[in-house]
Image (cartoon, helix red, strand yellow):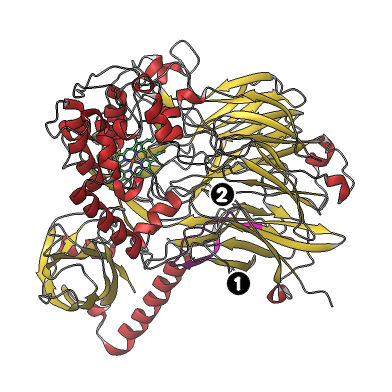
């Protein structure tokens, strides 16, 4: 990983530790926040204008509860579904849970998921991601992996 | 291509399908005016015209005229490549390779129809039977002269010297000696990457971090149009510039005055990265695999020789270096199933005569020949040497990278992940005396994703250690002992998930299991993409700080192997591919990474949305120069990665920045350019918001104001 990310990660760990010390019992020391940059699903010169848009999703972890909020814009057609999936960066995997997306080419995303231990472990190694499906791209139009902020 | 151009192309495409214009008329020629098509070939071609418009025209143009996304498929260049082959090979080739994004919707009948359309547009008009997968006639023999004339719509291209002049009238010319190449004058940039060790480093320090902000444009020179990734040479104040289409110009570095121009042909707008200077000659490889020497003073041709047979598909995209008094160059276009494979060759600098060849593909009865399974020699392909190597004059070894096996995926090659395929995707150290192999190190055996390790070998001395570094498409910076070939270490410079393990002692890589076992037509998702963590844009070694500073790219791909029939003359690349943003990068496609060559740690990185399209060039002024897709040319502080200067040029900045001095004044030169293959086409489909003119090849020269 890049220096940018690792410094951010280190700084983040430090802040989390501080927060945990002052505001919460030690059991909550694993609380953390994650961010996914939504970008286009795999595309080609022929499909590059049929798969479009972008966005950002923030996920906050408290215990096993992952609270998700975010936004997206500029999709080629209206959103039909949005999910959190499990799979290492750049490797698609199964659905973990649905989240809420508006019936629109852009808007707010939200959701709350109870992660099991496997999913929690996956989150910590950047192996959960968000995917939004659209009317014209049933297989998915936007996607982004969660990384610690 | 921006959105407007695409929708225009689609509009034209639909218009053409609707109204039987010029093109379909040509396609229907064989059937004459009769509305009752008595000609099964013409009927097939008419169907093919629609299929072509829908599936191919976006890249190859509705009239097969080509675009920045795909080559032209008509006229002389096409006939040169395909005229002596048969329709069956064309069918197999496009079925295996086109369109690059995937071919789920296309049947064999569709491909046959498209092949008929392409042939018919190219003037094949004596055929009446529909094509089938085994149709075997020589394409050119079935295009009548009238038909081929009809396709020749371009005026004849110039040949030879088109602008006469003499360098002596500007600066007295002194022949370039071996000693000068071994230790170039700080004012010169006499070869690709400036020196034999490929540091892309200029010892000039007049322009430094404290005054670079004052840099201003001295002059600009528009170049010929076409695909371009040039590396200018500068010798005693004269710039020798390779233009697209095999055109070389000599330009006065001080004033930007053209001195001479020579067209070695073919005038095809294709790309050549570099040329060489030696003695009193400029030596160029041509895109059709010839080697040509010009008089450096006048541009007049001195000798010419054939490197390989272009009609067999061989070509060059990089030029030679002159090492140990020999002209040494590589070869590309080696994906076809034919008897001859790729090689590195050395020629006599005075005559062009062949001195030796090193074959990059081991035949069954040769050392390494048992690494290709049971595959017959004919079907062993790949191993291109499409980036110019480097040279150690003390060891008398020339260091080259080789490209991967072809087709791209083991299953398409009729091989497995165990079939390493020597000497592909390797560093080869070749004796300049006789072309024998001194040692090799195969970075990625049995390559499976179109990620080659072919790029420049950078030679570095640290204490007593003589090292060689390279950085391939997997984004892994490799370090080896260049005397013994022993593996010394590696560093992942961008995210990669193709390998689950890289042995820290041996450097042996292990592919992810699904990549190892990839089957035909199954999608595999991996990072980086074939645009490469690093590609042809060379990295720089800044000796004063011990940093290797590399231009990197952050995209990923989905890849699906296609079937390739083992037929003589066939072959190809054979995969469907889609591209996406690299996770964890926030959409920053461009990265400059600086690595300590002793510890292999990343010391700093600079990231941005736009991908970088030039090599990095560092200077003794502690600056590193680099240009990007978004037309920005930047100077970064070598020690921090901070941007200390930037300007914006006419179109994307692409090529290899150089620095030189005339009368004690330092200049920085860089080209803007289009083309450049996957490092451009991949970012183009991801960062669609970045737009730039589709023309504008030029050379820009900067300096500090005189006070």
- What residue does disc 1 label? B646
Q: Looking at the image, is mark 2 or mark 1 earlier in the sequence?
A: 2
Q: How many marks?
A: 2
Near mark 2 (Cα within 10 A), the count class, few <14, some 14-19 or many ≥20, is many
Question: In the structure shown, which secondary structural element does the residue marked by tag 2 occupy?
Answer: loop
Residue B381, image x and y in percent? Answer: 41, 25
Left or right of residue B668: residue B488: left
- What residue does disc 2 label? B229
Q: Quadrant of residue B663?
A: bottom right
Chain containing the residue with disc 2 = B
Left or right of residue B412: residue B206: right
Q: Are marks 2 and 1 in contact (CB under 8 Å)?
A: no
Q: Are marks 2 and 1 on the same chain?
A: yes
Q: From the viewer's side, name the closer residue of B331 and B616.
A: B331
Q: Is residue B276 positioned above or below B254 on the image? A: above
Residue B188, image x and y in percent? Answer: 79, 51
Q: Is residue B360 positioned above or below B192 on the image? A: above
**Residue at the far bottom in the pictured view:** A23
Q: From the viewer's side, name the closer residue of A112 and B265.
A: B265
Residue B260, image x and y in percent? Answer: 75, 45
Q: Quadrant of residue B146?
A: top left
Seen at 32% across and 35% down, the residue is B121
B128 is within the stretch colored magenta? no
Question: In the structure shown, which secondary structural element does the residue marked by tag 1 occupy?
Answer: strand
Q: CA distance from mark 2 to mark 1?
A: 20 Å
Stretch in magenta: B603-617
């Amino acid at each position: 990983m890049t220096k940018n990310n690792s410094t951010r990660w280190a700084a983040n760990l430090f802040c989390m530790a501080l927060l945990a010390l002052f505001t919460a019992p030690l059991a909550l020391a694993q609380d953390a926040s994650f961010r996914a940059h939504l970008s286009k699903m795999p595309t080609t010169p022929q499909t590059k204008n049929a798969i479009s848009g972008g966005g950002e999703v923030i996920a906050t972890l408290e215990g096993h509860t992952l609270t998700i909020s975010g936004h997206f814009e500029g999709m080629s057609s209206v959103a039909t579904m949005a999910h959190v999936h499990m799979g290492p960066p750049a490797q698609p995997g199964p659905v973990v849970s649905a989240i809420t997306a508006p019936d629109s080419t852009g808007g707010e995303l939200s959701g709350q998921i109870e992660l099991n231990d496997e999913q929690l472990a996956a989150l910590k190694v950047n192996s959960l991601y968000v995917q939004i499906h659209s009317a014209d791209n049933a297989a998915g139009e936007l996607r982004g992996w969660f990384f610690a902020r | 291509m921006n959105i407007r151009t695409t929708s225009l192309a689609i509009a034209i495409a639909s218009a053409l399908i609707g109204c039987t214009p010029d093109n379909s008329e040509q396609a229907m020629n064989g059937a004459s005016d009769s509305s009752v098509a008595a000609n099964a070939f013409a009927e097939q071609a008419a169907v093919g015209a629609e299929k072509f418009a829908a599936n191919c025209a976006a890249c190859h143009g509705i009239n097969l005229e080509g675009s920045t996304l795909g080559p032209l498929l008509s006229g002389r260049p096409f006939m040169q490549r395909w005229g002596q082959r048969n329709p069956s090979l064309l069918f197999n080739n496009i079925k295996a390779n086109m369109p690059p994004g995937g071919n789920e919707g296309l049947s064999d009948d569709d491909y046959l129809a498209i092949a008929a359309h392409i042939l018919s547009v190219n003037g094949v008009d004596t055929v009446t039977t529909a094509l089938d997968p085994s149709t075997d006639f020589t394409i050119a023999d079935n295009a009548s002269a009238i038909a081929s004339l009809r396709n020749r719509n371009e005026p004849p291209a110039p040949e030879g010297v088109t602008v006469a002049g003499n360098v002596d009238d500007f600066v007295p010319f002194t022949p370039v000696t071996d000693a000068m190449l071994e230790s170039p004058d700080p004012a010169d940039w006499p070869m690709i990457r400036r020196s034999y060790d490929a540091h892309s480093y200029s010892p000039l320090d007049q322009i430094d971090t404290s005054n670079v902000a004052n840099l201003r444009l001295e002059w600009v020179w528009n170049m010929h149009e076409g695909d371009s990734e040039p590396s200018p040479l500068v010798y005693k104040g004269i710039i020798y510039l390779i233009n697209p289409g095999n055109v070389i110009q000599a330009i006065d570095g001080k004033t930007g005055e053209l001195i001479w121009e020579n067209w070695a042909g073919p005038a095809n707008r294709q790309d050549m990265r570099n040329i060489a200077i030696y003695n009193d000659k400029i030596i160029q490889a041509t895109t059709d695999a010839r080697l040509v020497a010009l008089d450096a003073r006048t541009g007049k041709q001195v000798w010419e020789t054939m490197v390989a047979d272009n009609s067999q598909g061989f070509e060059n995209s990089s030029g030679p270096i002159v090492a140990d008094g020999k002209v040494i160059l590589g070869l590309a276009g080696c994906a076809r199933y034919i008897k001859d494979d790729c090689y590195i060759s050395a020629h006599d600098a005075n005559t062009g005569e062949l001195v030796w060849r090193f074959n990059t593909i081991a035949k069954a009865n040769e050392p390494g020949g048992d690494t290709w399974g049971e595959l017959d020699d004919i079907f062993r392909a790949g191993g291109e040497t499409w980036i110019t190597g480097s040279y150690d004059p003390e060891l008398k070894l020339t260091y080259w990278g080789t490209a991967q096996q072809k087709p791209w995926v083991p299953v398409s090659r009729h091989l497995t992940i165990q079939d390493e395929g020597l000497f592909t995707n390797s560093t080869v150290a070749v004796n300049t005396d006789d072309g024998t192999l001194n040692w090799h190190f195969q970075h990625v055996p049995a390559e499976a994703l179109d990620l080659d390790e072919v790029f420049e070998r950078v030679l570095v001395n640290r204490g007593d250690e003589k090292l060689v570094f390279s950085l391939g498409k997997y984004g892994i910076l490799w370090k080896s002992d260049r005397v013994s070939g022993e593996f010394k270490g590696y560093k992942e410079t961008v995210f990669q998930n193709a390998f689950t393990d890289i042995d820290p002692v041996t450097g042996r890589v292990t592919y992810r299991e699904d990549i190892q076992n990839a089957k035909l037509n199954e999608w595999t998702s991996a990072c980086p993409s074939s645009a490469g963590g690093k590609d042809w844009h060379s990295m720089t070694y800044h000796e004063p700080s011990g940093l290797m500073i590399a231009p990197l790219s952050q995209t990923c791909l989905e890849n699906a192997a296609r079937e390739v029939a083992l037929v003589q003359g066939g072959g190809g690349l054979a995969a469907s591919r889609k591209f996406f943003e690299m996770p964890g990068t926030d959409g920053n496609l461009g990265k400059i990474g600086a690595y300590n060559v002793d510890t292999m740690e990343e010391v700093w990185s600079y990231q941005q949305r736009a991908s970088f399209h030039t090599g990095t060039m560092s200077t003794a002024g502690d600056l590193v120069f680099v240009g990007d897709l978004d037309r920005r040319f930047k100077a970064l502080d070598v020690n921090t990665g901070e941007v200390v200067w930037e300007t914006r040029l006419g179109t994307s900045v692409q090529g290899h920045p150089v620095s030189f001095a005339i009368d004690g004044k330092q200049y920085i030169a860089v080209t803007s350019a289009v083309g450049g293959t996957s490092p451009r086409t991949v970012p183009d489909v991801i960062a669609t918001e970045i737009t730039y003119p589709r023309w504008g090849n030029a050379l820009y020269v900067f300096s500090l104001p005189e006070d």
